Amino acid sequence: MAFRASAIRANRAIVYTQTGDPSQVLSALTYKPLPAPPAKTVNLRFLLAPINPADVNVIQGVYPAKPSLTELAENHSVFIGGNEGLAEITQVGSDVSGLTTGDWVVMTKAQAGTWASSRNVGSQDVLKLPRANGLTEVHGATMTVNPPTAYNMLNDFVKLEKDEWVVQNGANSAVGQAVIQIAASRGLRTLNLVRNRPDLADLTNKLKALGGTEVLTYDDLTDRTLTSTIIKDWTAGKGIRLGLNCVSGKDTTSMARLLGEDAYMVSYGAMSKEPLSLPTSLFIFKNLTTAGFWQSRWYKRHTREDKENLMKTLVDLVAQGKLKEPEYEIHSISSRDSDEVAGEKIRDTMARISRGQYGKKVLLKFDDAQ
Amino acid sequence: MAFRASAIRANRAIVYTQTGDPSQVLSALTYKPLPAPPAKTVNLRFLLAPINPADVNVIQGVYPAKPSLTELAENHSVFIGGNEGLAEITQVGSDVSGLTTGDWVVMTKAQAGTWASSRNVGSQDVLKLPRANGLTEVHGATMTVNPPTAYNMLNDFVKLEKDEWVVQNGANSAVGQAVIQIAASRGLRTLNLVRNRPDLADLTNKLKALGGTEVLTYDDLTDRTLTSTIIKDWTAGKGIRLGLNCVSGKDTTSMARLLGEDAYMVSYGAMSKEPLSLPTSLFIFKNLTTAGFWQSRWYKRHTREDKENLMKTLVDLVAQGKLKEPEYEIHSISSRDSDEVAGEKIRDTMARISRGQYGKKVLLKFDDAQ
């Protein structure tokens, strides 16, 4: 009988020593097995870790949250990529309560460095993810950024009642799809805006299958009857009180005009790379408020209990079949590859991501070294 | 002994029958003395009524608040200009409590039509202005729009503590000057932004004499040390948490960069006629919120008691010498002029206002007809 893989596995991480273009600066680094965890810490084995758009910005050095240097190999300090991920606890240090070997955990500390096969982390920096029927590794690995962004934006700004409408752009994004599902689970209706495209009917069907009420393109926003008649009909004259923005630029100016009196527009991204530009009259005369949402700030400013409740709520939605896995592809880091080859492969994946060649969430998976 | 003027005075109002350029569509109209006031109404004599920038937009037909047609002369329905003004009660109808002949009142109903020598109005549409030492007709006539806008913007969005900073543009506007004084009365510091101009030193001295802490020009905003060092020093690292905007456009984008974490930017005007355009990152990563303020909405959504308290607070500030009269000029409408001549004169004044030839508040005064 062979040794258990985990006992002899070589560790590897995706790292960088200076910020820059991820398709240039990233490399793979093999490091020694972790020692037994010190008090108040746990050793983790990462099961899956996503490459989120913000990770690219962190590596570029243009993101406000910065990682810290980690001495992964002796006298070799590096930044480890990755902010989000699902890990399994492999060993628990002394003075740790509520965590056991085999538990699934997610990170509540920003920029924890999740693109690694194993890590030692403070027990306060992870949160146990309750297991539930239907909760997959993919769910777990993508549970701390996109679904909570969607959930909190739907909750923290406007008290929406059943049957009320929410309008969002970038509706096909990971957050957008979570918004559709979480809104539907609360009986809210969504007006989902996407770019025009050849396969629009397919996308419309997909978003409606998730629970989206209506799907329109940014081009449709030029239709004046949309604000004057159609939305009034849909909302029985009440107007839409919540808009969610991850695009900015002129299409978002048009989206803002769809909002009714006393509405909030909450921004969580700016895919157009244009500013958010709005007629001042919307603020003064329609009482529009625009705010921003950043899940990292939410974690910083909320208690551990709040975070546990949030995870429980989302896992419950998964268990009820109301929150599906995002579409994904797995980038495996094979134990048969040398660091050099593994590094080349990840740099190539990052180049393809930055050229927009993935429509799906890319998840890193470190194969066992055997 | 002559009759008292008020008994035989001919009434006159500045009116229009269709919206358009005020220097074209306005005219003067003489009308009969008011009959005795019906129940629940009062007859008023206007003492002074300002021409506010918004009045111009109302006459142009581009303002969201619309006046109603009034049958001032028989079979001759007109719109009467003016939203704000100080009036004296000349006669009280039955079933009116708390109002007496001789009381000073201000309007709480929007677009009441204050550019008239006398009007009959519902007793619920006016508010008695408490008399106080030092409270002049000019104070009274300008008490319901600019000072409350300043007061409420300083109160309703961010709980500011003594010595905290507020930044505002258009600091030399009537609201801007009220902001300076009301902020100073609360021990708040103001960073006041104005356009560069030949007499900048004079303006700076004037705004500092009102209680302004610092005065800078929009050109100064290009100085990178302003955000990186100077404001950090001034605010002891806390940052500025409230910005007030009546300009919009690119200078306001620069102003927004002066704000610290969790700040509000409140817009009440857009003198540049440009949109408010902000990097989405300010919303997401600095938790900026942008909102609007419109005093007309405040009146609509607050109780009579709230309104009375607001007026009492502002009158108290006047009595304490903490809220000065705005600079003003009086446009007298002489009883010796025919309607034709009076109409020409007001159209000429409106043309000069729209060319920006008044730096001061213009107040309409109807001379007694004797």
Image (cartoon, coloured by chain):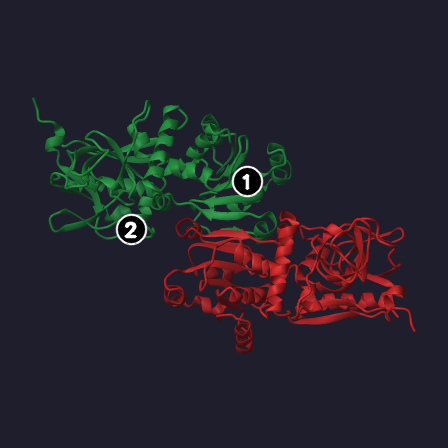
Chain colours: A green, B red
Discs 1 and 2 share one subunit: yes
Q: Which residue is painted at 54% across and 34% down in the image?
A: A165
- Residue B274 visible in the shown view: no
The vertical placement of B361 against B310, above or below, is below
- Residue B278 visible in the shown view: yes
Q: Quadrant of residue B142?
A: bottom right
Q: Disc 2 is attached to a residue of which chain?
A: A
Q: Quadrant of residue A315?
A: top left
- Taking depth in this image into account, of B124 and A39 the one nearest to the observer is B124
Residue B240, position as x, y percentages in the image: 44, 60
Question: Alpha-carbon distance for marks 1 and 2?
Answer: 35 Å
Which residue is identified by label 1?
Answer: A241
Give the residue type at disc 1.
Arg
Residue B234 horizontal side relative to residue A261, left or right: left
The vertical placement of B145 against B135, above or below, is above
Residue A215, position as x, y percentages in the image: 51, 33
Residue A359 horizontal side relative to residue B50, left or right: left
As helix, strand or loop, the secondary structure at mark 2 comes to loop
The outermost residue toward the left is A1
Give the residue type at disc 2.
Lys
Q: Disc 1 is attached to a residue of which chain?
A: A
Q: Quadrant of residue B203?
A: bottom right
User: Could you say which disc has been placed on residue B335 in the image?
Assistant: none
Which residue is identified by label 2?
Answer: A66
